[in-house]
Image: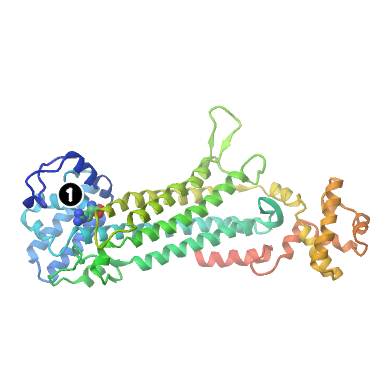
Amino acid sequence: MSDTSSNQMWGGRFSAGPDAIMEAINASIGFDQRMAAQDIAGSRAHAAMLGATGIVKPSDVEAIRKGLLTVLSEIETGRFEFSTALEDIHMNVEARLTEIIGDPAGRLHTARSRNDQVATDFRLWVRDQLDAADAGLQALMKALVTQAEAGADWVMPGFTHLQTAQPVTWGHHMLAYVEMFARDLSRVRDARARMNESPLGAAALAGTSFPIDREMTAQALGFDRPMSNSLDAVSDRDFALEFLGAASICAMHLSRLAEELVIWSSAQFRFVTLSDRFSTGSSIMPQKKNPDAAELIRAKIGRIFGANVALMTVMKGLPLAYSKDMQEDKEQVFDAADNLMLALAAMEGMVKDMAANRDSLEAAASSGFSTATDLADWLVRALDMPFRQAHHVTGALVALAEGKGCDLPDLTLADMQGVHDEITEEVFGVLGVHNSVASRTSYGGTSPVRVREQVARWQEVLG
Ligand code: ARG
């Protein structure tokens, strides 16, 4: 980074350059250089509008346009020298433009402020991230639907309190996550629709006396319309907070799936085998294969939610309009976005590669009296017993089986009739785990029939 002693952007009022510490706390170029492409796109749209409205003469606009393209290519090819003394990406770009094209560069900032400039750049950057999250979520959902289709009728234990509750199908479990990520996707799309308005032309805070055309710049940058209040336009960071909010909930969902993968891949469960591509070994214990990617995804919620809390706290209590506090928005969002995209991609890779161990799933599903509810339901249906009584009778049968060290289907008819004499042979038809899941055909239920319907629906939605 190069250094200059006086500031060419506002040097007129100042007799001394900033203290080194002032420069260090003030500069954002170390991180906001990530918005270079957005900054130049915003400047190009602004310059074209200044030309079209006759505010700046065509030859100057053309010089600015060409100069900005040169600056962009210097940045893209790593030849640009960023300067801390020039504080941020906006001033770095403009200073370099001045070096390249001279005087006409000074006209670019007509009817504009860094306040509407940074609001525009950051909106464009966050909009790209919403689009990336959209794509990442869809890819992950597809991977889960593929798993669901393959194992639509594989049985596994369904848990509540992490205690065996009732058998469910593997496909049903995979599709539960598809539903969660679909809601995340819809939050991302809502946020994008709401944030897609242009702050450009709000100038410092009050608008401008120049006859600018805000519709034109909004359209050039792919925004639906200009924001309708200049004070709000320069001081709003809701769009970043909505991104962080949606990202936080998505990261929370990712952490739940990650946690299940950690448990399922353990030697005690063996529900899934994770691929070598997404596992690591231990330097001391040769037998180990660790689910590091899942653990790291599980942990990412920490920084993503942290960013959400941090930016909420930065924005809380800020008076209108722009305050320098708002420069603290970017690093949080950059870090959260980087980690969300990485987590989505890693989860997609893990889900695609993982192999569900059908036999272990079925063996686990069959243990822990997982069909006790089916037995109670049968007593209600076949013997017209009130459910509360059926629950009680079933409880006694579970206790009997537990005492004998066997599972419910292993009890003899005589054992059962000892507890309730009207029980018939027919009861054994509902006790197997396959019978159990096949019977749960209520809408949204776990039966393979319902799961296949939902798989087909998601395949249609995801294309
Ligand atoms: N680097 C600043 C930011 O990120 C740009 C806006 C500066 N505006 C100002 N009035 N100092 O917020």
Where residue 331 sits: x, y (%)? 33, 49
Query: How many numbered circles are shown?
Result: 1
Residue at 53% of width from left, 55% of height from top? 143
Q: Nearer the viewer, residue 462 or 304?
A: 304
Q: Quadrant of the N terminus?
A: top left
Residue 20 screen position, x and y as percent: 18, 39
Tell me which residue sits at (52%, 43%) in the image: 295
Residue at 22% x, 48% y is 75
Question: Can residue 355 be seen from the camera position used here?
Answer: yes
Observer-nearest of 343 and 333: 333
Farthest top residue in view: 284
Above-or-below relation of 257 to 216: above
Q: Nearer the viewer, residue 94 or 460?
A: 94
Query: Of residues 29 and 454, which is closer to you in this image?
Result: 29
In screen coordinates, is 155 left or right of 321?
right
Instruction: Note whether residue 130 is visible.
Output: no
Q: Quadrant of ligand 1?
A: bottom left
> At label 1, which amino acid type do we have?
Asn
Identify residue for label 1. 92
Q: Is residue 153 left or right of residue 48?
A: right
Left or right, 305 with reference to 396: left
Q: Quadrant of residue 426?
A: bottom right
Q: Position of residue 202 (x, y in %)?
A: 21, 66
